[in-house]
Image (cartoon, rainbow, N blue to C red):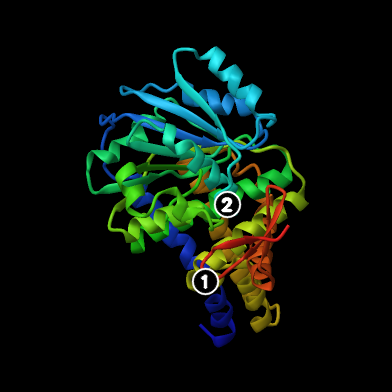
Amino acid sequence: MTPDTLLPLLAVLPPLAYGLLALFCARAWFGRQRPGPGHTPPVTILKPVKGMDAESFENFASFCRQEYGGPWQMLFACASADDPVIPVIRRLMAEFPDRDIDLVVDGTIHGPNYKVSNLINAFPRARHDILIVCDSDIRVTSDYLGEVTAPFADPAVGLVTSLYRSPGVRGAATALEAMGFTVEMVPNVMVAQRLEGLSFALGASMAVRRTALESIGGFPALTHYLADDYQLGNKIHRAGWRLELSDCFVESVMHRENLTTVLSRQLRWCRTMRASRPGGYLGSGITQPVPLACLALLVSGCSAAGWGAVILLYLTRALVAVTFSRRYLRDGIFPRWLWLLPLRDILAFATWALSFAGNRVRWRGNLFRLLPGGKIVEIG
């Protein structure tokens, strides 16, 4: 093999190898012998809410249809009595009168993270020792509670988190965001768990032991962070507890949105992770396919060898995307939206690069400045 042929292949080797590594890690994780559910401790589901999400009632109702052997409570936390989601919660209470559902309306602010303020305000009403924090746009299957509580049979487990997917996307812009779960988030979690163990949580679903939460100072320890999910998992990990990844996917139900909204949210996520994990986030740049595909073409002078390396990279990307989508997430995104994969990669690289160009993020209508370590200060 001549240098002219070898150089473009070496250029695309990092993202190509990372994709294959992610497939290996996913096969090992999803193919392992799984412990069956059976441990059913009492559970409180804490659900901070603000405004309406796509299909809010059905999202909430999915928690009321649980087939679970133990007692459980669902506690909504809202800051304003005028919030449009409150009538939906009242309807839920009326349609599921046999379920233990309660609502806390309290506008007390404990820090710049208003979601965490809601959790602090609702926490005194939580009756049980396993607490589940779950986003308002999440929908679950009927076995969800049984799956996420099973690992707590081991007293060393402090937190259980869940992977998430977004089936049934509406439009190309939403598909661009949803496929990020399939080709980036889930593969990254698979690799991280395999190589270094789980040391963070995913905000869509986090089940935490009360004593583990108390060991880090409770929810008040998270009030000044934007990435409260990452911080909750990382702090509990550093306090000596073990974190577990649940086998049960939860579903993020999305509105049909425009590309500008998607880009803004992606940039917020990128800047948040850059501030929370600066070294790892910077290093993740070597797995970005777009700049390395361009490098392969540059070093080869756009020769056949360069284009061959790019085609090999994207055949591998397509294999990884379709395998994760159809075999592991079962989200229906690929192969239907496979034609958008290069554009998704451009979006991922653009937001990764732009994350270094500023420290401001907009979240639910408020503007914040990110500080080193992931803390935030509201500026408007």
Residue type indicated by callout 1? Pro
- Frontmost residue, 54 versus 235: 235
Give SS at disc 1.
Answer: helix
- Frontmost residue, 142 versus 276: 276
The quadrant of the rendering that contains the C terminus is bottom right
| Residue in the image at 55% along x and 87% along y | 3
* Gap in angstroms between the C-alphas marked 2 and 1: 21 Å
Give SS at disc 2.
Answer: loop
Of discs 2 and 1, which sits in the foreground? Answer: 2
**Coordinates of residue 339 in the picture (x, y in percent):** 68, 50
User: In screen coordinates, is 360 left or right of 221?
Assistant: right
Q: Are marks 2 and 1 in contact (CB under 8 Å)?
A: no
Residue type indicated by callout 2? Asn
Write down the residue under mark 2: 113
Report which quarter residue 274 is drawn in.
Answer: bottom right
User: In screen coordinates, is 80 left or right of 70?
Assistant: right
Q: How many numbered dots are placed on residues in this image?
A: 2
Regarding residue 17, the answer to whether it shows in the image is yes
| Residue in the image at 73% along x and 38% along y | 256
User: In screen coordinates, is 345 left or right of 141?
Assistant: right
| Residue in the image at 48% along x and 54% along y | 222
**Coordinates of residue 257 in the picture (x, y in percent):** 74, 42
**Coordinates of residue 115 in the picture (x, y in percent):** 56, 45
* Label 2 or label 1, whichever comes before in sequence order: 2
- Frontmost residue, 377 versus 67: 377
> Which label was assigned to residue 278?
1
Regarding residue 319, the answer to whether it shows in the image is no
Report which quarter residue 56 is drawn in.
Answer: top right
> Which label was assigned to residue 126?
none
Decide: few, some or many residues near mark 1? Use Cα within 10 Å; few <14, some 14-19, many ≥20: some
**Coordinates of residue 201 in the picture (x, y in percent):** 43, 51
| Residue in the image at 39% along x and 27% along y | 143
